[in-house]
Image: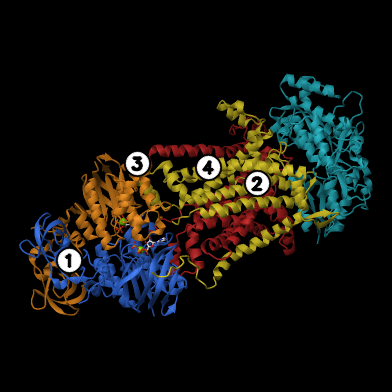
Chain colours: A orange, B blue, C cyan, D red, E yellow
Amino acid sequence: MGNLHLASVRKFYGTHEVLKGVDLKVDDGEFVVFVGPSGCGKSTLLRAIAGLEDISQGSILIDNADVSHAPPAKRGIAMVFQSYALYPHLSVRDNMGLGLKQAGTPKAEIDQRVSHASSMLSLEPYLARRPTELSGGQRQRVAIGRAVVREPKLFLFDEPLSNLDAALRVQTRLEIAKLHRRLKATMIYVTHDQVEAMTLADRIVVLSAGKIEQVGSPMELYNKPANLFVAGFIGSPQMNFIEAGRIGMQGLKTLGIRPEHVTLSRVEGAWPAIIVYVEHLGADTIVYLESETLGHVTARLFGEHAYAPNERVFVSFPESHAHRFDNDGNAIRR
Amino acid sequence: MGNLHLASVRKFYGTHEVLKGVDLKVDDGEFVVFVGPSGCGKSTLLRAIAGLEDISQGSILIDNADVSHAPPAKRGIAMVFQSYALYPHLSVRDNMGLGLKQAGTPKAEIDQRVSHASSMLSLEPYLARRPTELSGGQRQRVAIGRAVVREPKLFLFDEPLSNLDAALRVQTRLEIAKLHRRLKATMIYVTHDQVEAMTLADRIVVLSAGKIEQVGSPMELYNKPANLFVAGFIGSPQMNFIEAGRIGMQGLKTLGIRPEHVTLSRVEGAWPAIIVYVEHLGADTIVYLESETLGHVTARLFGEHAYAPNERVFVSFPESHAHRFDNDGNAIRR
Amino acid sequence: ADATVTIESWRQDDIQVWQEKIIPAFEAKHPGIKVVFAPTAQTEYNASLNAKLDAGSAGDIITCRPFDASLELFKKKQLADLTDLKGLENFTPVAKAAWSTDDGKSTFCVPMASVIHGFIYNKDAFDKLGISIPKTEDEFFAALDKIKSDGTYIPMAMGTKEMWEAATMGYQNIGPNYWKGEEGRAALISGKQKLTDADWVKPYEELVKWKPYLGDGFEAQTYSDSQNLFTLGRAAIYPAGSWEIALFNSQAQFKMGAFPPPVPKAGDQGYISDHPDIAVGLNSKSPHAAEAKTFLEWVASPEFASIYANALPGFFSLNSSPVKMSDPLAREFVSWRGPYKSTVRSTYQILSRGTPNLENETWVESANVINGTDTPAVAGEKLQKGLDSWYKPAAAK
Amino acid sequence: MSKARTSHFRTGFVHLALISYTIIALFPVFLTVINSFKDRASIFRSPMAPPNPSSFSLIGYDTVLAQGNFGLYFYNSGVVTVASIFFVLLFGAMAAFALSEYRFRGNWLIGLYMAIGIMIPIRLSTVAILQGMVATGLVNTKTALILVYTAQGIPLAIFILSEFMRTVSDDLKNAGRIDGLSEYAIFFRLVLPLVRPAMATVAVFTMIPIWNDLWFPLILAPSEATKTVTLGSQIFIGQFVTNWNAVLAALSLAILPIVTLYVIFSRQLIRGITAGAVK
Amino acid sequence: MNDKIDGTVIDVRKATRWHIGAFLLPAFLVYSAVMILPLAETLRQSFYNDVDGALTFVGLANYKVLFGDARWSHDLWNAFRNNLVFFAIHMCVQNPIGIALAALLSTRKLRFAALYRTAIFLPALLSFVIVGFIWKLILSPIWGVAPYLLDLVELKWIFAPWLGRTDSALVALSLISVWQWIGVPMMLIYAALLSIPDEVIEAAECDGITGWSQFWKIKLPLVLPAIGIISVLTFVGNFNAFDLIYTAQGALAGPDGSTDILGTFLYRTFFGYQLQLGDRSMGATVATVMFLIILAGVSLYLFTIQRRLRRYQF
Ligand SMILES: Nc1ncnc2c1ncn2[C@@H]1O[C@H](COP(=O)(O)OP(=O)(O)OP(=O)(O)O)[C@@H](O)[C@H]1O
Ligand SMILES: Nc1ncnc2c1ncn2[C@@H]1O[C@H](COP(=O)(O)OP(=O)(O)OP(=O)(O)O)[C@@H](O)[C@H]1O
Ligand SMILES: [Mg+2]
Ligand SMILES: [Mg+2]
């Protein structure tokens, strides 16, 4: 119950191919996160799964049944839209309760589920308001609540937390994780937030330009990116890519090293560099450097550091943490 | 040119007070970021500055002129709406160019500015499309582009990057910073993203329930939060709050310690604790602990660590990094 | 430049006759005057004409409805006084009555034509069924019975949907035989007779008897339905006005004849409705009054009478000088003028001056009587009551 | 191609319902048209039968086309209708925008004032209008008709458009204001394109009474040079006419141009792209 | 605590907003000059009457006649009653069916939608002359189309010369008028339905709200203002109607006045008919009364219903 199988799903808008053959199996109860650059087709894929978008080719199976041509209502899903899509004429309470009411759920249970969801999302004070009277973040939470109360077997979330502040985001993220554990529902989740992706996902699917680049657990992607794209996409700040030839390494094209593995020293180190810019984030300090041999290098240092632009420092990194990529950009496994 | 002065600005929706007397001076060319929990009134304040919302009391001065009652067009501002508010019937190009066209800017210059903005926002392939044919992130970038091309003296950004992926977000953030330097325009920026706030802001304004809690440079807020609210709001994961009484400290109510200052050890330390949950983010590891004396504690460790739930460890933190708060939640300065 | 004289009219059907016959004949004789015939739909004519006259944009020559409608225009000084127009002497006072003041002193339109009521019948059908022309009421109904029992034809083509058929082709057609034409009409106007009197109710009683001989669903049968029923040969008798002649000639594929309304008893004096219908007058604000008068004078001439009556068989000239007509059916109608006494429709003069309007009420009641909504007696009462509400005849004072 | 969103059953039902009503709507028109191609006897004998070789006849059309200058009439009707629609839409939309967008004293009063026009038939004031036209020398010009029709159409346009304009997102208009658009630019560049479906609807509603009007052409512009089609073809529909061929032919002919106009306007009904304007 | 401030918002933009005037002016001018002034001039006549050939001010005398005189008031109330029936039939038949058709038409990805729309709207494009003519023919017992069709479905026995019967003519005409005008509510509702954003409908689909319940629960509430409009337009249209009855039944609105509505009554009075001369004064009086009736209805809508209708911005 609740498993999902995408078999070479393709989608055209006119002649423009947005999904270029997506194959994916999601197990029942799994939490899968889609990530990828803006415009790569995440929402389109989600909408295709929901049945809101006809797919041009391929098939979609939910619970082993081919639903490629079934209407959304028949697919047993709930969806949080990137654009919220709240019912403008209904109060927050009714926005959340309408689907249940339609399904004939007893009133008492509707009330109970709605009040549970709204307390989970801190929406209690707004239950009687209409969407126009809510702030952006509040609307987004209503959209989440509307999906959550229905407790279907398959959840589709399209960037559900993008308008929430950090604290609320953490809290809601934890609530979604809890919900996932409680309902054992399958969840497909689109996000741009690395932390969300890393913490929520059983598996992350990295999409790029309508194709899957890599599928794997968060740590797998972080530690063993399959190619340059994934390596660059996962992790913020981005991985440093260094032309292998420049530092005299053979048998590979590019060397990748994450900013957190770069160390700086004022006195000694492998390569001299000049600090271009420093960002103080409180818990970390991000240092942007320019090195003659390495090119641009970003270093992420734990805690606060008193580096300043134009200072000359030495850059080092442990080769053990380096990623190697061949001419095609694919990772070279050791 | 471009300075802003809010004098006890208040705003009611019906009888519901959303802005409870906001006072703020923003210098010409300053970059000010508004942060605060969802629904605290950030958008409302921004809209009031833009002249889209009548304020119920107080006054707004731009360039030392009282514009409290001036129409938006007369205020010389550009704004990115949280809801984008793109013109659905116009192409991306025309969405960006309309304001300039209206102002009678020569066609060549419009083209030049639009193409500059769209290359900065990676929107070139979409210039001929209409908003409905764009992904969420692309729409958001169009909204940014529309504000950017106008190059006014005062920019208002309402969560402009919330739908962008990490890489694009960093890139766009840098572009905005660059723009700020180039135009020397005043910018007011609402965001939920701590990194954005910390890196972009000259000053951060922390709002809560329609009131300003603290105004200061990022590091000031991070290192010297004025009260519990600010301390808890700035920094992710949240600062740990420990009841001072429990660990036998006098003269204060609460002790605050940031997760990155908590250290864990399997062998020795100040307080024993049990690991509840571990999040592996790649570059960091977040460990959630439960200690009999301290209560919930979150620790943020640099790099990857092999801690697992239910493990017993010792928690320590350097008192030098601790924040002290009195009974009213205000910080006690040393 | 030529002066252009525009004629306002409701006779759209005659547009060809005017353009091809009448106007060329006039213009040939009067170079320098151009005439334009500008008809309006008959249903809109009165309203639009009144508006145009009030605003001053009406044409030079106004086609006149008989009696009050035109009298009203004359009173408002919108029609010029034509009493002294050369050629009016060609008309008898009776002919001019419909377009003269009540006292007969002033005349404001040049009479053009009258129409005669009667019955047109399908000669082929009559021949086939061996029916001869009914002279009396009894013969009339005997003929109808015969047609009905044969079943090939609907005995009589008339509907009540538009009401005026029932009133004009029914009541006004046969009525004069009962109220004795002008005699009864004058008595009604003077107040000596009432619509509740037997002479006036009797025609309704006759009309009731028509009902079984009308086509199925006659209640919803329109005027053009009736015309088509007859001209397509599906009905045997058509209660008619002479104005149908031209159209019927062109549409019917069978031989037609006509007979006047049958008299109640053999030997009774017969009456026919010979109703002045159309005339032309002069817009008093006409910028081309002189030219328009020239035209009107020509209309009063025998020449016009002859062209008009022959071009539009069924519209009989009111000119005193006899007109030679070629159409046999028209000749049949006009031949009744001698043996039968002529009268005009009872409701037209004076009695329809107020509200409720007797003519319109008569439409409603005639249809009601045939439909069975009202009995003849009730109809008479209603009509009289309506009339009493505004009309105070001299005799009643 | 697949249709994921609607089940076949539902689609089938929808088509069935629509086809049923379409038949009801079209049947009388269909009857008119087929009979206009038949000779008079066949019209009567078998009204439901389509024309066949023995009953086919173009006599009706011959009669109609022989009468008057129909090309010119069509041209006049076209000019009058299109010009009136243009002014009705322009002026009506402008006023509707003012009434729906701004709060000002007397707003509702003006709204009510503007609605009076749909409450009394304008025909009643014929005399006064005609007097005005005589005074200004506009009798027998198309301008007179256009003026009257514009005035006649404005109230309805305001009534409908102001309701639709209220549904245009404020954020969008505000975005325009911030972009420095003047109120005029907001109206012309943002609001008008967004209420296009409503504009098309109003255009169609305005067009019908204008195209079919008999009265004002008769009163204000009856001259041969300014005659409209309805006035020109009215000749066949007068009370004493039984020439059904001509009547049916004239009716069939009269349907054509207005349907064409309708199709042109209803094209504009295609989705006014609004989704995506707001998040 | 701060001193409590009144929460109401005063529109504070003080600069004279010339653009409001500019937007209103063209419509206002044309409309006032060509419509209102002449109308006022006409309605003014209801206080005047022809006394001895001169138009004289008579105060409310005309109204006294209209309401006091048995014949006048009988006609007036008869017309008013018939008009109510006429209106009720439109509201109960035309608008629900029109809305339903619009709902069906707005089904997404419907093929031939434009075709259906044109077909259903077609009757509204026809002039009254055509409509009156063609329906008289169809319902004519002589021509036999209606009986023939009814015979096909074994219902011939219900056929009657409906237009000629006092008990059925008004209903028959109302239904003809419904047939003619059904496209109007359909078009308006259709336009309103078009402006509902796709995503709201999609959300409903995902929520399992489909078909009729989607229509009732999502679409209908969102187009309620448009339904308000069509109700008012129906009301105004019906109480002003006259052409159809005029062409189908004649100015006397037979049989026996059974199809007489305010519009026909007014036209008969104002413009006259056949031998009856137009009576501008009484006509204006009737027009004023009609105007007041309609104004009352419209005001009722504007001030009670329209204000309560919520509008949603998309
Ligand atoms: N039209 C309205 N009527 C009543 N209350 C409103 C209205 N608009 C906003 N509010 C309320 O005002 C408060 C402030 O809203 P605002 O949009 O300024 O929040 P925000 O700080 O931008 O939040 P977010 O980060 O979620 O966008 C919210 O609690 C919201 O519910
Ligand atoms: N209706 C449409 N017509 C044409 N192209 C479209 C349409 N809708 C989306 N696209 C294009 O398809 C691509 C994928 O869009 P999609 O919304 O799936 O992106 P996404 O991955 O969700 O991006 P984001 O993170 O910005 O929301 C985009 O490049 C977009 O421009
Ligand atoms: Mg997306
Ligand atoms: Mg906001």
Q: Are marks 2 and 3 on the same chain?
A: no
Q: Are marks 4 and 1 on the same chain?
A: no
The amino acid sitting under disc 4 is: Pro
Quarter of the image where ligand 4 sits: bottom left
Residue D34, position as x, y percentages in the image: 60, 37
Q: In this orientation, does residue A208 appear?
A: no
Q: Residue furthest left?
A: B267
Residue visible at 49% across and 50% down in the picture: E224
- Gap between marks 3 and 1, in whole Å? 49 Å
Q: Is residue B262 above or below residue C386?
A: below
Residue A105 badge: 3
Residue E20 relative to residue A201: left or right? right
Dot 2: element: loop
Dot 4: element: helix
Q: Is mark 2 within 8 Å of ligand 1?
A: no
Residue B245 badge: 1
Marks 1 and 3: in contact by CB < 8 Å? no
Q: Are marks 1 and 2 on the same chain?
A: no
Q: Is residue D47 above or below residue A61?
A: above
The amino acid sitting under disc 3 is: Thr
The amino acid sitting under disc 1 is: Gly
Q: In this orientation, does residue C381 appear?
A: yes
The label nearer to you, 3 versus 1, is 1
Compare marks 4 and 2 and give the one earlier in the sequence: 4
Residue E96 badge: 4
- Gap between marks 4 and 3, in whole Å? 30 Å
Give the residue at mark 2.
E241
Callout 3 environment at 10 Å: few (<14), some (14 to 19), or many (20+)? some
- Gap between marks 4 and 1, in whole Å? 72 Å
The label nearer to you, 1 versus 2, is 1
